[in-house]
Image (cartoon, helix red, strand yellow):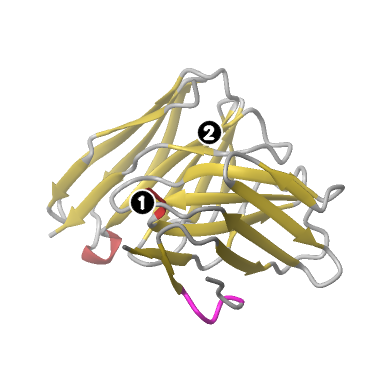
Amino acid sequence: DTEVTQTPKHLVMGMTNKKSLKCEQHMGHRAMYWYKQKAKKPPELMFVYSYEKLSINESVPSRFSPECPNSSLLNLHLHALQPEDSALYLCASSQDLAGETQYFGPGTRLLVL
Amino acid sequence: GENVGLHLPTLSVQEGDNSIINCAYSNSASDYFIWYKQESGKGPQFIIDIRSNMDKRQGQRVTVLLNKTVKHLSLQIAATQPGDSAVYFCAETVQGAQKLVFGQGTRLTINP
């Protein structure tokens, strides 16, 4: 089983809203990732968690706040987003950080109005 | 059908033909490479990978070739089918670097 699930599939929010994206994997992977993908572009790394600890923050604005409650779950809390933050948000996981294959979820399509 | 480097982001092939998607990677220290397929509205799907100690690896209908001398990676798809229509991304990483570096992607379209 190489499944990473993400909820919701679609999200529309205003610039004053607070929302959260959720990601779950049951493969026993110890590394989890958030990516942002704009149309016709490759995924851009936002955050990396390794063994439930934040390992990398790619200078992401503080209006994006990641959280890793346990080894299977990864959240991305959203607050005061801008219209340019509209994108596909992808979660991925890998066995660990040692150059292993990352498996992606289906993504959450976010629209900020 | 074949695309050349990253300057031709779209590749059109006839159904049943073989497709070759190319990728020029940037880091000579990269030692692990992955091809992903991304269909419209979906997340990237792992297709095949290769480590730098190999120059060729085969899967079901797909073959990845690695030429470290010129930092070039290619994905060959045999007998292309309509279901192969997607954007294909190459990705490279250095073991322990914690990051994948993605190429810009190539859109593969299949003509009936």
Which disc, if any, is residue A26? none
Q: CA distance from mark 1 to mark 2?
A: 19 Å
Q: List x then y, in percent, for residue A14.
A: 12, 53
Q: Amino acid at mark 2?
A: Ser
Q: Amino acid at mark 1?
A: Glu
Q: Which residue is mark 1?
A: B39
Q: Is residue A44 above or below residue B22?
A: above
Q: Which residue is mark 2?
A: A93
Q: Secondary structure at mark 2?
A: strand
| Number of numbered discs on residues | 2
Q: List x then y, in percent, for residue A71.
A: 52, 20
Name the residue: 56% across, 26% down. Answer: A52
Q: Secondary structure at mark 1?
A: loop
Instruction: Judge the density around disc 1: few (<14), some (14-19), many (≥20) Cα neighbours within 10 Å.
Output: some
User: What is the quadrant of residue A97 in the picture?
Assistant: top right
Does residue A61 appear in this view? no
Q: Is residue A105 above or below residue B35?
A: above
| Residue range corresponding to the magenta coloring | B5-9
Name the residue: 77% across, 56% down. Answer: B30
